[in-house]
Amino acid sequence: MFAYSASDLYCESVPLADIAHRVGTPAYVYSSQAILGNFRAYHEAFGDLPHNVCYAVKANGSLAILALLAKAGAGFDIVSGGELYRVLKAGGDPAKVVFSGVGKTADEVEFALEQGIHSFNCESEAELALIDALAARTGRQADAAIRVNPDVDAATHPYISTGLRQHKFGIDIAEADGVYERARGLRNLALRGVSCHIGSQLLDTDPLLEAVEKVLALAARLRAAGHDIRHIDLGGGLGVAYHAGEEAPQIRAFIAQLRERLKDTGLAVMVEPGRSIVGEAGVLLTRVLYRKKTASKDFVVVDAAMNDLIRPSLYQSHHEIIPLRKSERPPIVADVVGPVCESGDFLARGRKMANVVPGDYLAVCTAGAYGFVLSSNYNARTRPPEVLVEGSTWRIVRPRETYDDLIRGETP
Ligand code: LLP
């Protein structure tokens, strides 16, 4: 959905330079066609297998994106009361919401119960007891799944790998049978599912399939023991191509494999994809402020910084950086850095890139997931606007913050 036509980079049918001129930089721009295309790839590949594609709100919680997905029939995976609030404001159906996370508070659980969400993915026995007690108070029975830790190595960045025994997530799959057994006594909790999530940005799907086998084996044991298990939730995790030419898993092909594996189990299946729906659907536009040469390096100083996109600084992640207008000048090798006062503030290091001059615009690619949501006001920088492109039209779905926004609610 982002491609050059002649020398200009377009998002769908809109030249990105038009947006940059009108809204200024830095700015996030999302392609609605890309987002919907990815969602439909999941939804359609499941076919007639009972399923619920619960978009992981944490990847990008922009109301406009949630609304697009809600209209297309998506469910939502949330990890906080705030994310549930966003889903509701965007017109999402609470009956298709699953609540994940290792540290749900009582307030959040109550809010979710009041709204009638589909299911809680529980991560400890103490949490099961809390949800049971709060459900009793509201006079409802809460549907829940236990998130098991299947002890498989997701082979991804250590900060976003979650499925090994040493991680804080889930209940060790070896102990799960006992936990389901003890939970029978919780009258206001209906344990109807088994869930897992082994990590994010997985470029190899074998660990996911290994986890599926373990989860299915557990579900079969639980059913044999008389538990009314109706669904499995396989979490998110499919990776996207951050490097030009990198091969990322194909959504349709992966889901077709899952479907084959699940079609005779009688279980409904849920997935919680985030990055693979919005990652490649977004770019961060930025403008070159200065070129600067030191004895050892060439720097391109741009107006976007680690507060706008923290992934390179936090996970050493690579994002392609390409010009909005191609030039004939020979490429350079440079560090692309922002105005924040830290050496850790960089978008790329030692990067072969376009030979830009001050005033030129660049697109930091594959920034739709874990981009804006992880942005901050560090250095009292206003957060960038978000723009949604739909065909040949576009609109600002969140304006650039103002200085007043920066101090809202504060008293001197
Ligand atoms: N479900 C659960 C329980 C999760 O913890 C996550 C992501 C997802 C679903 C969605 O995973 P995805 O399909 O997006 O891989 N900030 C990091 C990524 C953190 C992922 C956290 N959990 C980054 O920028 O790479």
Image (cartoon, helix red, strand yellow):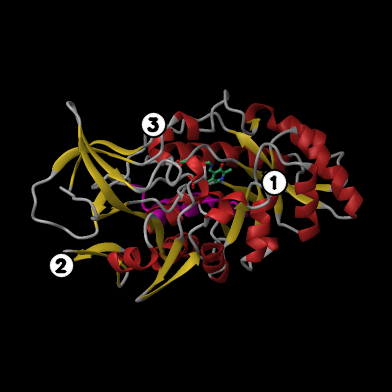
The part of the image, by quadrant, that contains residue 345 is top left
Which residue type carries mark 2? Answer: Ala
User: Callout 3: few (<14), some (14-19), or many (20+) C-alpha neighbours within 10 Å?
Assistant: some
Write down the residue under mark 3. Answer: 344
In this rendering, position of residue 32 left or right of residue 52: left
User: Callout 1: few (<14), some (14-19), or many (20+) C-alpha neighbours within 10 Å?
Assistant: few
User: Callout 2: few (<14), some (14-19), or many (20+) C-alpha neighbours within 10 Å?
Assistant: few
| Residue 52 position within the rendered picture, expressed as x and y whole percent measured from the top left | 58, 59
State the extent of the magenta-drawn residues as a range: 248-273
| Camera-side residue of 325 and 10 | 325
Magenta segment: does it hold 249?
A: yes
Asked if residue 364 can be seen in this view, the reply is: yes
In the structure shown, which secondary structural element does the residue marked by tag 1 occupy?
loop
Looking at the rendered structure, which numbered label has been put on residue 6? 2
Write down the residue under mark 1. Answer: 411
Which residue type carries mark 1? Answer: Thr
Marks 2 and 1, how far apart at CA = 52 Å
| Residue 180 position within the rendered picture, expressed as x and y whole percent measured from the top left | 75, 37
Looking at the rendered structure, which numbered label has been put on residue 265? none
| Camera-side residue of 82 and 262 | 82
Residue drawn where x is 24% and y is 55% of the image:
359
